Image (cartoon, rainbow, N blue to C red):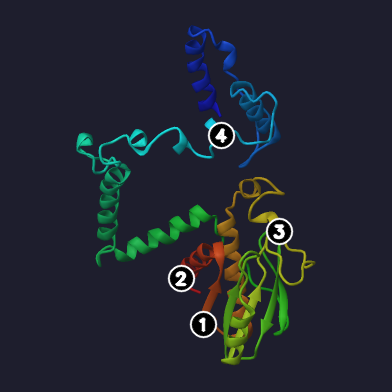
């Protein structure tokens, strides 16, 4: 916002010089990611004032009454370079595009990463990954699991969250299956796993509404932080770290009740949580 204000201040002398100072209007709407009514109204007012649509008609208007610009220009007029592309036009040599710059940057980073993966440094490299991932995600080792029963339980999650757990099947080895609201674990997959002799442990993480919406977990909008803005910042924790810790808790529950989980299945944005959980379990020796 400050940078935008500075840009407006720097532009103002030019508007004065052209005798159009009144044409420079600014609207600042304090809001998190998204649109707010204040900025919407200012935008609509700008269009109505500067584009001559004073009647505020909802009907789209196109030059000459056609629905596209092909009525005004032919292909040769719309083609800026001789070939139609910056990459191949001889008049643009050296034909540098976005990928030309990122390729050099990426190649250096890849070479550095490859060097760190060598046998001499691999142990320290993976240790650095664990510590960096914990710091970035806000992960904290979860406390001991307290739960009862083998057909299901409710264990303590992060903060005031609770993690309801549903257990299906009576196989010899457990599989942890976690789906988000948008991309749930298919029921057919659960059936196939139980029929194959696995015990399926299905938790509902904080912020996701499971089959029983009254289980008392955090609001559904927790992940998106819509109803409770900036909650992760206020807790000084990332949503990834909170969910990773909860997945570790569920794995502990499964291990205590049924034996060490043989796999963790997740959907949607939960992939990064599960990957973080994998790193942390290694670092904790679980």
Measured as percent of width and height from the top left, residue 199 is found at 61, 86
C-alpha span from label 4 to label 1: 65 Å
* Side of 4 relative to 53 (left or right): left
C-alpha span from label 2 to label 3: 30 Å
Q: Residues within 10 Å of mark 4 (few under 14, many from 20)?
A: few
Measured as percent of width and height from the top left, residue 131 is found at 44, 58
Which of the two labelled residues, at mark 4 and mark 3, occupies the earlier sequence position? 4
Nearer the observer: mark 4 or 3; the answer is 4
Residue 66 position (above or below residue 3): below
Mark 1, secondary structure of its residue: loop
> What residue would you read off at disc 4?
65
Q: Please tell me which residue lies in front, 219 or 84.
A: 84
The circle on residue 220 is 3
Q: Residues within 10 Å of mark 3 (few under 14, many from 20)?
A: some
Residue 261 position (above or below residue 85): below
> What residue would you read off at disc 2?
282
Where, quadrant-wise, is the N terminus in this rendering? top right
Mark 4, secondary structure of its residue: helix
Q: Residue at x 67, y 45 (%)?
A: 229
Q: Residue at x 60, y 48 (%)?
A: 236
Q: Please tell me which residue lies in front, 245 or 201.
A: 201
Mark 2, secondary structure of its residue: helix
Q: Residues within 10 Å of mark 1 (few under 14, many from 20)?
A: few
Measured as percent of width and height from the top left, residue 28 is found at 63, 27
User: In the rendered image, which quarter is residue 261 located in?
Assistant: bottom right
Q: How many badges with numbers are in the image?
A: 4
């Amino acid at each position: 916002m400050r940078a935008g204000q500075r840009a407006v201040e720097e532009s103002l002398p030019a508007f004065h010089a052209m005798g159009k100072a009144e044409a420079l209007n600014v609207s600042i709407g304090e809001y998190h990611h998204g649109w707010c009514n204040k900025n919407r109204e200012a935008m609509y007012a700008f269009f109505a004032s500067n584009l001559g649509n004073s009647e505020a008609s909802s009907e789209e208007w196109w030059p000459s009454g056609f629905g596209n610009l092909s009525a005004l220009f032919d292909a040769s007029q719309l083609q800026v370079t001789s070939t139609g592309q910056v990459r191949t036009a001889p008049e643009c040599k050296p034909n540098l595009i976005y990928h030309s710059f990122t390729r050099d940057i990426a190649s250096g980073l890849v070479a550095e990463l490859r060097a760190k993966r060598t046998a001499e440094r691999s142990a320290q490299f993976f240790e650095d990954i664990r510590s960096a991932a914990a710091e970035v995600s806000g992960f904290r080792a979860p406390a001991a699991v307290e739960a009862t029963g083998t057909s299901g339980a409710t264990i303590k999650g992060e903060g005031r969250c609770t993690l309801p757990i549903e257990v299906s099947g009576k196989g010899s080895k457990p599989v942890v299956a976690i789906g988000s609201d948008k991309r749930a674990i298919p029921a057919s997959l659960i059936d196939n796993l139980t029929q194959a002799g696995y015990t399926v442990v299905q938790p509902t993480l904080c912020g996701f509404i499971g089959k029983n919406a009254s289980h008392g977990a955090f609001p559904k909008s927790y992940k998106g932080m819509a109803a409770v803005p900036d909650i992760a910042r206020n807790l000084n924790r990332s949503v990834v770290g909170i969910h990773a810790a909860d997945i570790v808790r569920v794995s502990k529950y499964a291990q205590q009740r049924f034996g060490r989980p043989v796999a963790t299945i997740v959907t949607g944005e939960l992939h990064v949580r599960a990957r973080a959980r994998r790193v942390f379990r290694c670092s904790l020796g679980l």
